[in-house]
């Protein structure tokens, strides 16, 4: 169908239409699986500092390319916030503090099963985390 001469709206096609649809969409998240992952993250964050030599988990992307990924610093951030070192946590990756808060909320609210998260929020979070890490490692 084509737009008539009196129609003020231009048809939206192609990539712009796809991008608008994707960014206005929501993603259904299974909180049961996320709850288990959050509990494991909190357990590792508490347990790793107790191990000899305090092992960390290296970032595969940074190890292979030298470029930090949006998740770089998350292990350090989670371990730091669980030890009460909020400033160190935020310096490593501000989303570590957010991840711990979300994990704790999910653990204390076991009846929550699903949530819809705006895709735009996920894209913005990933982009801002990556910019933080690129700045932290002096790439930008």
Image (cartoon, helix red, strand yellow):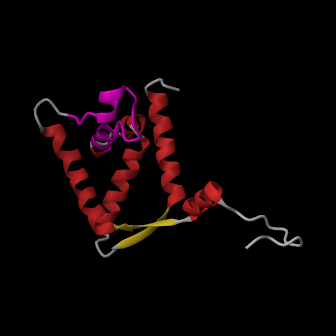
Residue lying at the far bottom of the rendered structure: 111
Q: How many marks?
A: 0
Q: Pick whichever, 30 or 15, lies toward us.
A: 15
Residue pictured at 36% horizontal, 25% vertical = 66
Q: Residue 34's spot in the image, x, y percent? A: 30, 62
Q: Which residues are magenta?
A: 56-81
Residue pictured at 17% horizontal, 41% vertical = 48
Quadrant assignment for the N terminus? bottom right
Q: Pick whichever, 107 or 23, lies toward us.
A: 23
Image-based side of 35 in relation to 86, left or right: left
Q: Residue 94's spot in the image, x, y percent? A: 43, 42
Residue pictured at 50% horizontal, 44% vertical = 127
Q: Pick whichever, 30 or 73, lies toward us.
A: 30
Image-based side of 73 in relation to 128, left or right: left
The quarter of the displayed image where residue 13 is located:
bottom right
**Relative vertical location of residue 17 with respect to residue 90 in this rendering, above or below:** below
């Amino acid at each position: 169908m084509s737009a008539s001469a009196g129609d003020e709206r231009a048809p939206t096609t192609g990539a712009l239409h796809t991008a608008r649809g994707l960014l206005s969409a929501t993603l259904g998240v299974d909180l049961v699986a996320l709850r288990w992952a959050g509990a494991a993250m909190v357990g590792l964050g508490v347990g790793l500092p107790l191990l000899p030599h305090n092992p960390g988990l290296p970032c595969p992307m940074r190890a292979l390319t030298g470029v930090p990924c949006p998740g770089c610093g998350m292990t350090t951030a989670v371990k730091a916030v669980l030890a009460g070192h909020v400033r160190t946590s935020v310096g490593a990756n501000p989303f570590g503090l957010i991840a711990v808060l979300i994990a704790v909320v999910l653990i204390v609210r076991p009846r929550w099963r699903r949530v819809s998260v705006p895709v735009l929020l996920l894209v913005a979070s990933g982009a801002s985390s990556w910019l933080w890490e690129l700045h932290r490692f002096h790439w930008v």
